[in-house]
Amino acid sequence: MSNGEDEETPTDAETDSDAESVSEESLIERLDGAAQTIEDAETEADLDEIEAALDAIESDLEASELPVPDDEDEDDPNETFEDRLSSLRDELESQRGPYASDVIETVEEVSETVEETRWTVAGEPDVLTAVETFATAAGEALDDHFDPDVVDVDEATNALADVVATINAAELDADEDTDTIEALVEAADELASAVDAAEEWDDLETYEQLQAEGYYDVLGHYKDYPPEWSALKEHEKRGNVDMILLALDSLQSDFMERHCLESLERMGKRAATDEAIETMLQRANKRDQFAISILGKMQAAEAVETLIDYVDTDKNPGLQKVVFKALGEIGDTDATQPLADKLIMENDNVRPYAARALGLLGDTRAIAPLADTLRTDENPNVRASAAWALRQIGTKRALERVVDLESDDAFVVDTEIQKATKELNAVAPSA
């Protein structure tokens, strides 16, 4: 092995000599030669050799020390050579292929579009026809046979997958199978164009979408304008929750949005389909108070976890009021403790809502904190709400906590005490 002393390294002079050997004339000659070989290339191997030659030219150009013109208006030879080199690379790439992988990529992209797009009644048959036509053309090109009779989107995507699998298995060569690949490329491009031209749901105007879904079918003679509002009223009467949700999603005006939400709120539990609850939950996650109120009317237990997260939003008392009421209407006792904790919050405009929500829940665990609130809270509205809540719980023990107070200076509280006394007397004989 050498100890390093005998190894020769290029001197600065030799390096300078190499750089000087790369002249403008030599680069022009090599680039001209590469351009001609690109024109004459017949195989992928030829193109690979040309690419290697271009790589070598690029390396030499980077290592060269071509003079930079003093005049800014003169062209920099380095930039000129780099531009021509880039153009030759583009020309080289244009000579490559076509490849079977190009066909597969196109077909897979089309298949994804076919599967994920919502097609109109008119558009889907066009898509299926395009797939059948492509399968037939691909079969002819590959000297194979595909069953092109597809009746729905699932069969269409399966048919495209079969063609892709066959192309993969054929192991087509860009040089030896050029005609086959070109035929497949043409068929795939025609498939992509036909699918792109097919009518999809998003191409329709809002009115056309609603009409296609049968939204207006319930209309006879109507007097309310717009007709969407008249149809909405009829769908509410008939309990067509899906149509109300369709209108809510499709119609962007504040006017129709408000009426759609009001319809769901009036329908209450009748509107509590999985889709409706999910739609309202999405809005509730953005702190939409109307949606939260609707979830309460629906008695949607699925909303409890989300709503409990909002119980402590003391900086937003308006939201708290709606949340407390909704939790009470839903009636899930998981909310009992979080609501009971709010009986001692500072805002005496919100505390009554916490008390009333506990009354709606009817959980006997709330008797003690409600009784404490009734005895000690300084706000008469809060005390009255606590008394009302105990009456809603309605057990003998709950009523006794109200009656034990005997009287209150505030009329609203005293009224609740009197009602509780009558109710306790009514249950006492059977107790």
Image: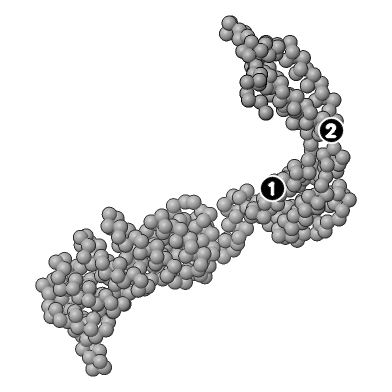
Earlier-in-chain disc, 1 versus 2: 2
Q: Is residue 183 above or below residue 18?
A: below
Residue depicted at 18% across the width and 76% down the height: 415
- Who is closer to the viewer here, 277 or 5? 5
- Who is closer to the viewer here, 302 or 429? 302
Q: Secondary structure at mark 1?
A: helix
- Location of the C terminus (image quadrant): bottom left
Q: Secondary structure at mark 2?
A: loop
Residue depicted at 71% across the width and 21% down the height: 57
The answer to whether residue 58 of the structure is visible from this angle is: yes
User: In the image as oriented, which residue stretches furthest toward the top?
Assistant: 71
Q: In this rendering, would 269 be left or right of 131?
A: left
Q: Is residue 106 above or below residue 120?
A: above
Mark whose residue sits in front, 1 or 2: 2
Label drawn at residue 109 = 1
Q: In this rendering, would 243 be left or right of 61?
A: left
Residue depicted at 75% across the width and 53% down the height: 160
| Residue 303 coordinates in the image, percent (x, y) | 42, 65
Q: Is residue 388 above or below residue 277?
A: below
Instruction: Please tell me how crowded label 1 is: few (under 14), some (14-19), or many (20+) other residues with Cα within 10 Å.
Output: few
* Amino acid, disc 2: Thr
* Amino acid, disc 1: Glu
Inter-mark Cα distance, 1 to 2: 28 Å
Label drawn at residue 43 = 2
